[in-house]
Image (cartoon, rainbow, N blue to C red):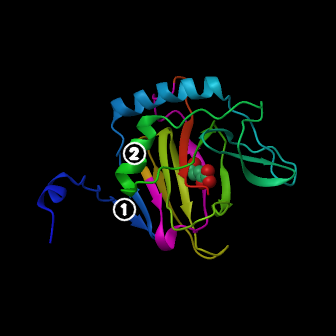
Amino acid sequence: MKDPVAQETAPERPRPALVLRGVEVFDGLVAPAEQAALVEDLRALIGAAPLFSPMTPDGRPMRVRMTSAGRYGWYSDRRGYRYAPKHPSGGDWPPIPARVLAVWRQVTGLARDPDCCLVNFYGEGAKMGMHQDRDEADFSYPVVSISLGDDALFRIGNPTRGGATESVWLRSGDVLVMGGAARLVYHGVDRIRPGISALLARGGRINLTLRVVD
Ligand SMILES: O=C(O)CCC(=O)C(=O)O
């Protein structure tokens, strides 16, 4: 028998504005005032766990600067890509801000919270090559990504490398979910459109990527 109270109180999952190759895009899900509050949360987060430029396993510095929050942070050096329990300075990663967790819960409806919030900072000229997110133990959990600041041209490919791709411009406040059959699609950021947004005082783009790790 249906529980009428549960029906009335269950939060409604928003509808994506666009589904591209199974990747859901929620346009402007984070309202401007909430984006500004998130930037304040991130200012404190980056104060506690400063941005750094990881090395790729073949020894090149990544163009995107990064830090993380949560039980794990994402890290890369000559030893490869992996999750690390500590910031490279040796300190703990700060907790994931409540406002960020609220977005995860809204779009996933999951009781399980993410273990890692990767913070990617894109200055002018920064980009991220096509890759799969596959360092996590259980691919049944989606990946959720929040865009803040300047626009980014996000490219979506296939579950295997190569083949045709399609792109979408992500704007400040957009939220993207890669789940189900789209959990392992190759994706990347070709470029940002600098100076489009006034959200970040010195310009640029911040992307928050949320994942369940283990
Ligand atoms: O910046 C983005 O929108 C994507 C980030 C991403 O793909 C990643 O961190 O793995």
From this view, report whether residue 21 is shown above or below residue 78.
below
Q: Which residue does the image show at 54% across and 55% down from the upper left? A: 154
Which quadrant of the figure contains the C terminus? bottom right
Which of 151 and 212 lies nearest the eye of the viewer? 212
Residue 85 falls in image quadrant: top right
Give, as a single range, the part of the protein colored magenta: 176-200
Q: Mark 2 points at which residue?
A: 103
Q: Name the residue under label 1.
A: 18
Indicate which disc, 1 or 2, sits on the residue closer to the N terminus. 1
Which of 195 and 23 lies nearest the eye of the viewer? 23
Q: Which residue does the image show at 75% across and 38% down from the upper left? A: 53
Which quadrant of the figure contains the N terminus? bottom left
Horizontal arrangement in the rendering, residue 78 relative to residue 75 (left or right): right
Q: Which residue does the image show at 64% across and 35% down from the upper left? A: 93
Please state the horizontal and vertical placement of residue 15, each as a whole percent of the image. 29, 59
Q: Which residue does the image show at 72% across and 35% down from the upper left? A: 87
Please state the horizontal and vertical placement of residue 62, each as a whole percent of the image. 75, 45
Q: Measure the alpha-carbon separation of dots 1 and 2.
A: 18 Å
User: Secondary structure under badge 1?
Assistant: strand
Amino acid type at image mark 1? Leu
Which of 54 and 153 lies nearest the eye of the viewer? 54
Amino acid type at image mark 2? Val
Horizontal arrangement in the rendering, residue 99 relative to residue 186 (left or right): left
How crowded pointer 1 is (Cα within 10 Å; few <14, some 14-19, many 20+) is rated as: some
Badge 1 residue CB within 8 Å of ligand 1: no
